[in-house]
Image: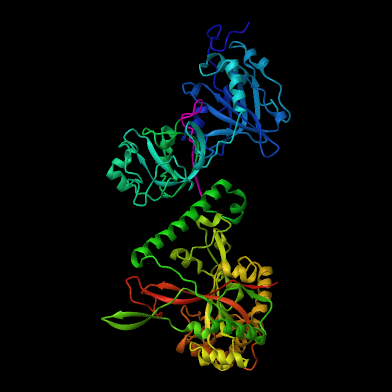
Amino acid sequence: MMRPLRDRKPAAKAKPPLFPSTLTPLRAILDDDGDAQPGSMVNVIGVLKDCRAPVATHGSDWKCTLTISDLSIEDESAGVELVIFRPEARMPEVGAGDVLVVLSAKVQRFKSNPKSLITSKITTVCVYKAATIPVYPASAQVALLPPKQGESHKLLKEEHHQYVSYLYNVIDKYDVPDEAEYQQRVKVSLNVKDKFSLLKDVTDGNFYDLIGQVAKDPYTDEMGRITLYLSDYTENDLFFHYTWEGVRDLASAARPADAYPEDNNPEAAQQHPWVGPYGKRTIQISCYDAHADFIREAGVSAGMWLSLRNVQVKFGRNGAHLEGFLREERNASARKVNVEILDIVAPHPSVTKAKVDSRLKEAVRRWRDYSREKKTQILAVKAAQEAGAKRKFARAGSSDELEKKAVEEQEKVALGLNELVTCEAHPKPVSTLASILEPVMYETMVNGQPVKIPLPFTNTKYNACVRVVDFHPCNLEDFACGRKWSEFDILSDNDHDDDDDESDQDSLNSTMDASNDEDQDKGRTWEWRFALLLEDASTPSLPATVAAMDKDKSTRKCDRDPKTRARLWVTVDNTEAQCLTGLDAVNLRRDPHTLATLRERMFTLWGNLEELKADKARAAVKKREERDEGKGEDEDINGNGRITKKRKGKKATEVVQLENLKPPLEDSDGEQQQQQQQQHQQNQGEEELSNKPFSCCLKQYGVRVSEDDDGLPKTDGAAGGWVRVFGMFGTKICV
């Protein structure tokens, strides 16, 4: 009759065998500086201490996790984990105390956990049943189970069989469970459930897996425990309420002094300012042991995203608010870490759509929405403090406005607008570009005298009838530009934040800068960015329209004369360009299909404008060559009319200057507008521009410029001035 596992001892003293040279001690795997580093292949031997029963995965394989120990780590409570991925029929049949010889296993480090082993297609798991292993020095070959399909025991020698017998009889089996306890552990391992929860749903006395953003730099107390503040931007009424002023100010006046120990430490509060969400959206989590060490060594700080496993949630010492506690798990390695740092900056669009955890994406989405709401609230508070609350009154339509609207409908029919270009419906009447360019005066009192001050810009939207007479950049290939990925790019509905100066500066890098370097595309996303020069097309052709415009004092005479129609540049950002063209931005120099589709759709908008620009560029180059023949300068034209310069002289030609000329950031009013009209008339030559006018929506807004930006109008102010800018929105080319 076999003795119990914990009582078996060698029958007689014998000389210990040598450790097989083909095997690797488990200590070399467990130690961070050991010889077995992640990625290496090893052969190991160990006694089975724990088993998590096989469970199905998303693929055809099943997953099983075994924990083994050998003489090099027998003094430690935890062993080395062996993760097995195989079909269920090929899973090893093991029991408590069995000795395993694992051949060709791969060393891995999964997330922040200690190193472990994982099987591959060439891995062989040899099982010696504990009940039939003889007393050393007898060979344990009699206890070896037959190999599973696809495995072979040819590499096992007599030295392996003898060492199995020795290891089993001399190793301390205190941590090896008996058969009843072992079966109970296996049964419990099958009861795996998803413990993930949003913070709004956590309750007292339960364990949860959480994903959230660090709301404040972690704080280490005198005992080495780390206090972590985590938010997933959902609210829980049982959380502590962080007010607008900061973490130490309460929504209610009363609370115990030790509710949050750090709040009573002014130095800690100053060193670790609150940057997270306000309200009841953040939970305090106390982290111990290996979890605290990892957070400290990894440099976790405010703003980072974490995944936490097995966090216990219960009421804190004050009994009023829920807190979290992250401790060492039972029957787990003392160095097992349940903290994972999540990288939300997507390196490639495929990662955004397929590989980013959907739960993380939803948390980032809530963060984005909260940030926008907070920004709006701050602006509202500042506006209320400076100017007080303002009320908006709806303006009733007068008879004059109704009459003018009817006239505009007749004028649209007479203008022959392009039916393939549509725009949003707005209650505002059609405005002429001249009236849009009119400066708005602000009336105020200075020293008791009325004074009119021109505003640098107004946030206004318009309806207009226009036609396109120029565009920038000169080549369609440059209509899309690249920029680096940002944290919010994993969200499908995210828009690039134009207020970010650094990101905006990076986005100005056009495809020209990366046309011959594929590495430039890595880690970049592409956005539309171009501008259109619009000409007023609302020239009156009906008597009623002329009379209405005569009545409107804000209408300029230049609107009536086709030779002096007002013009202005409008920007088309990424979102509005997607609406206009129905295309997503790509590197157009490497995607000829999208480039051809874009050219076809823009032809619907501007007619033969692109062909005219290319023809004029060729004509200018030809004229230049005839004039400067023999001066050592040469220029080529590609199929799109772009000028490729091979220059030996010192002066740049007028054609090159014209091509590189950027549209003005400000409006095209006054002298600048006349110069642009004259320049455009010179460029047009004999052939006429042929395109239809269309209805569109325009918006006016302001852009702050620094004092270093020369040549731009500025207003007085410490941070520079403002420039008026126009943009197109809500307009679509129908395909």
Name the dominant secondary structure of the magenta segment: loop
- Rendered location of residue 513, percent (x, y): 53, 69
Residue in the image at 54% along x and 28% along y = 80
Q: On the rendered image, what quadrant is the C terminus found in?
A: bottom right
Q: Is residue 629 visible?
A: no
Residue 415 as seen in the image, left or right of residue 279: right
**Residue found at x 39% / y 80%:** 713
Between 649 and 681, the residue placed more toward the observer is 681
Q: How many marks?
A: 0
Residue drawn at the location 30% of the way across and 44% of the way down:
268
- Rendering coords of residue 653 (x, y %): 52, 87
**Could you tell whether 469 is left or right of 147 in the image?**
left
Which one is nearer the viewer's eye here, 400 or 310? Answer: 400
Q: Tell me: residue 629, above or below residue 230.
A: below
Spot occupied by residue 644 in the image (x, y as percentages of width and height): 58, 79
Residue stretch rendered in magenta on the structure: 328-343
Which image quadrant: the N terminus? top right
Within the magenta stretch, is there residue 340?
yes
Front residue of 400 and 68: 400
Question: Where residue 61 sits in the image (x, y, percent)?
Answer: 69, 35
Can residue 74 be found in the magenta stretch?
no
Q: Is residue 525 visible?
A: yes
Q: Is residue 227 above or below residue 673?
A: above
In-front residue for pair 547/90: 547
Coloration of the structure image? rainbow
Residue drawn at 50 percent across, 42 percent down: 200
Please give left or right for residue 404 compared with residue 709 in the image: right
Residue farthest to the left? 447
